[in-house]
Amino acid sequence: MNSNGNVGNAGGEQRQDLLGLPRRKLAAALEPFVDRPYRVEQIFRALYERGVTQLDSMTELGKDLRQHLGTAFTIAMPEVATHSVSEDGTEKYLFRLSDGATIETVDIPEGRRRTLCVSSQAGCALACRFCVTGFWGGGRNLTAGEIVAQVLAAQQGPDFRIEGVNIVFMGMGEPLLNLDALGDALEVLTERISRRRITVSTAGVIPGIEAMARWAKRPRLAISLHAPDDERRTSIMPINQRYPLKELMEALHRYPTEPRERITFEYILIDGFNDARADADAVAKLIRDLPAKVNLIPMNPDPALDPKLKPPPATRVEAFRRRLISRGLTATVRKRKGDDVSAACGQLRATDREPRGFRRSNLRF
């Protein structure tokens, strides 16, 4: 599949993927083939409400039209290479895409609701030291269709209810380095899922944050913070050299939020690195003038990562949370789920190539 979502068939011809096309783009693509506008609506509903994966299954269309469409279009659902289920019910999918690239998606049950952790790139070039995806290194951007297809594939599960789904772009990749595909995917997904139940998480890509600020309709925004000062943040997140905290905070102060909406700051707690009482005070000072809440994430170790990266004791995690609350912030601790199948935060990896590794270790404890 190329960057435009075109897939080659056996004869080498390129067919356009119908998945990920918002209504306006779907109508434009179908215009040479259909002469009645309601056909666009039929195809859109077949894709996203009925979950049709083959054009021949769109029996509301005539046979001749289906055959005609089949010469120009495809529905490029990924192959489920592996499907792992954690003891806590978390499900992890390894999807193989049409060009052989692989991505991972996590489905986390939460009572009557569930959260889908969706990937935006096949790999990640940001090389955050606490993230296995970064250890494996960069890959290509996903198309809008490949993003939407992750949700559609999970939707085929027996207990899936679209009404109770939250979507978080916290899987493999940096979503704001793939803005065009992200925008189209969101336009499709929000036909059925409220934007208030979709969160886009970024390591702090300021141009992407500024672009999202100009969108008429925006999902929730989450910022991967993980350290309250530039020195330590740069040591675990190299992107901080390009977009340091002062500039990031200035961009967030300009970012429009709706009434009662808050920006989520994700903060991985690493034993002996960023988990002291003074660090909690520094975090509170950094974000005190923003509509903010903090989601604390005890570090999820992985054999691919530096063994010094481990979670603090539970008592220190709770002390950190209480310190933030005492400073007027809302703070929660993310429950650890799926770590027995490497589905927890920071553990997603690509398996179609050898890991790149990190250039050098510059952790400062």
Image (cartoon, grey):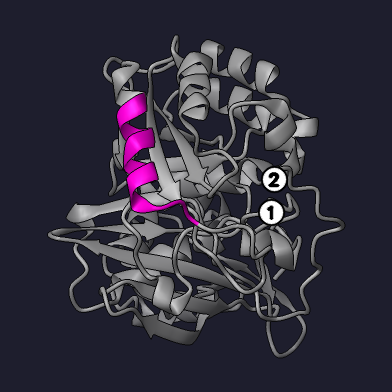
Q: Residue furthest bottom?
A: 10
Say which of 261 and 233 sits in front.
233
How far, Cα to Cα, is label 2 from label 1? 5 Å
Q: Residue 60's image quarter?
A: bottom left
Q: Residue furthest right?
A: 359
* Residue topped by disc 1: 129
Q: Residue 56's image quarter?
A: bottom left
* Residue topped by disc 2: 236
Residue 237 lies, with reference to residue 339, above or below; the image says above
Return the x and y of residue 212 as percentages of the image width and height.
Answer: 55, 28
* Quadrant location of the N terminus in the rendered image: bottom right
* Residue 313 part of the magenta-drawn span: yes
Circle 2: is it few (<14), some (14-19), or many (20+) Cα within 10 Å? many
Return the x and y of residue 131 as percentages of the image width and height.
Answer: 62, 58
Magenta-highlighted residues: 311-323
Q: Give the mark, 2 or 1, whose residue is nearer the N terminus.
A: 1
* Quadrant location of the C terminus in the rendered image: top right
